[in-house]
Amino acid sequence: MKAKLYTSKMSNLFFENKVLKLALIALIIITFLNYVKLESALNNQSVILVPVGFESRIEISSNHASEEYLLNMVEVVQSLALNYSPGNAKYKFEQLLKMYDDRYFSEAQFQLNKVLETVKNTSNSSVFKLKPDKTKISTDNKIYIAGDREIRYIGKNKEPEQREEIYVMEYLIKHSTFKIKQFYKISEAEKQKIK
């Protein structure tokens, strides 16, 4: 009698052990599927803004932004990078550096410090008149910014320099935040390829 009771208890324990293992495996699978769905939902989540002065909505998700948003960022970046005087260049460049991705920050800081030194030494100011109709957004996270730039030399009897220039802004959208990778002027040869 005791042997039968012992075998039935052991059978019950083995059966209970298998059921618990099966329940644990099912719980792990459900948790993993829940994680995958949650991650997908977070990546597809977007924020829709309708700021004052805009006729259409501006949309940004975790890794994509609408054209209207990108054009607005072009105006902000070109204003900080290309419209300056000796009195406000340092402040504008500091604000611009806040928009750079961490991986590209030190290179951008080095380049902007060189420009700042030139501005202080030559006492020049820069005015960039953006041409929105010639600004192009490419699919590889680059924006070609065209405009007329005028460099004036303060306190010197030197004529202002005026020329058409095209700049490239490489960007990325990281966690629904716009970040600059690089901002540079293209050469005359590259300018002809774009036109």
Image (cartoon, rainbow, N blue to C red):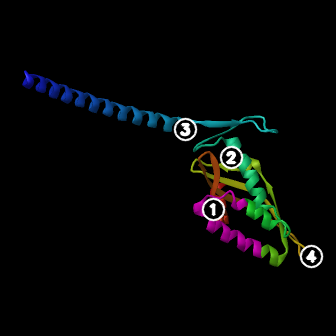
> Along the horizontal axis of the image, is 194 left or right of 92?
left
Is the residue under label 4 in contact with that under label 1 (CB below 8 Å)?
no
Is residue 163 something one can see in this rendering?
no
Return the residue at label 3: 42
Residue 89 at what x, y percent from top left? 80, 66
Q: Quadrant of the C terminus?
A: bottom right
Instruction: Tell me the mark number nearer the camera, choosing from 1 and 4.
Output: 4
Instruction: Please tell me in which quadrant of the rendered image residue 63 appears.
Output: top right
State the residue in front, 79 or 24. Answer: 24
- Distance from Cα at disc 2 to Cα at disc 1: 22 Å
Residue farthest along the top direction in this orientation: 1
Mark 4 near mark 3, Cβ–Cβ under 8 Å?
no
Q: Which mark is residue 176?
A: none
First to last magenta residue range: 96-117
Kindly indicate whether the residue at mark 2 contacts the one at mark 4 (C-beta within 8 angstroms).
no
Which dot, 4 or 3, sits closer to the camera?
3
| Residue at screen point 58% across, 36% down | 45
Cα separation, mark 4 vs mark 2, equals: 37 Å
Q: On the image, numbered disc 1 is attached to which residue?
A: 190
Q: Amino acid at mark 2?
A: Leu
Which numbered disc, 2 or 1, marks the residue that appears first in the sequence? 2
Determine whether 184 is above or below 2 in the image.
Answer: below
Label 2 residue SS: helix
Q: Earlier in the sequence, mark 1 or mark 4?
A: 4
- C-alpha separation, residue under disc 1 versus residue under disc 4: 34 Å
Measured from the top left, where is residue 69 in percent x and y?
A: 70, 43
Residue 112 colored in magenta in the image: yes
Q: Quadrant of residue 111?
A: bottom right
Vertical arrangement, residue 51 with respect to residue 133, above or below: above
Under mark 3, the amino acid is Leu
User: Which residue position is annotated with label 2?
Assistant: 70
